[in-house]
Image: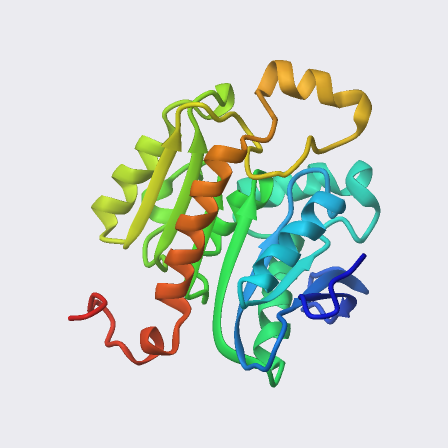
Amino acid sequence: MTDPHGPRLQDVVLTSGAGGTPGLRGVLGIPPGPGPWPGVVLVHELFGIDDVMRRQVERMAAAGYLSLMPDLFTAGGARRCLVPTFRAIAAGSGRAFVDVEAARTHLASLPDCTGRIGVLGFCMGGGFALLTAPRGFDVSSANYARLPEDPDRALAGACPIVASYGGRDPALRGTAAQLEGVLTRLGVPHDVHEYPTAGHGFLDDTDPGPRVLRPLLRRVLKFQPDPVAAADAWARIEAFFAEHLSADAARRPEGDAPGA
């Protein structure tokens, strides 16, 4: 049963820009109580917007953020859209990036949005969270994300980034340390952490994806929830977002640390 005093989810249609998806769909999470609130664009995993992803939108709304997840597979589901979406990540441009920007623009237009907006992504979406960090967002959370081919160039000028990885994720071994090094060189404020017990997808609250694929995903990618690591990662994400999306952050001169 839905809590009448909790966050509300709405299915919405967004206006995307030139080269974007016509009739772009999304899920909007509205926090309880009075606004205005900062906004967060969430970018889904490779399985699209399923019940797991809808609960992630709800989680961020419960934390006090207008939360919007655009459906990057609106034009034909994962079967037709997955490969073009990964090609867009590799190129750093394309329809999916236009759609993510459409979500940011939509949040900024809402009267209950403060205008401070972050981006948060999982798996495939984590790649978008990294690549869009220099593109108008105020903070980014990249979770088990591959690094771009030239991360020093792609992340130059990025907003503050909080990132989480699993030490048991065979596809991303060493990525957390690489990202830490890149962000340190670039002078980007960051919090990067690797959880030794966790594999891929550990922020999900249940096994994601088609049921028939779940044993394979667990065995090959160690793709499974890790409640202990997830609780710590969410605490870090929420603290980092609270710091960088607050009204105080908006007034703080660029480069000043909190309390400076």
Residue at the right extreme?
Answer: 76
Residue at the top extreme?
Answer: 219
* Relative image position of residue 176 (x, y in whole percent): 36, 33
Give left or right: position of 2 versus 217. right
Visible residue check, residue 145: no
Residue drawn at (24%, 50%) of the image: 186
* Relative image position of residue 1 (x, y in whole percent): 81, 56
Residue drawn at (35%, 64%) of the image: 243
Residue at the bottom extreme?
Answer: 111
Q: In which quarter of the image is residue 101?
A: bottom right
Nearer to us in this view, 40 or 175: 40
Give left or right: position of 250 versus 124. left
Residue at the left extreme?
Answer: 260
Residue drawn at (35%, 77%) of the image: 250
Residue drawn at (59%, 31%) of the image: 225
Give left or right: position of 27 versus 245. right
* Relative image position of residue 33 (x, y in whole percent): 61, 77
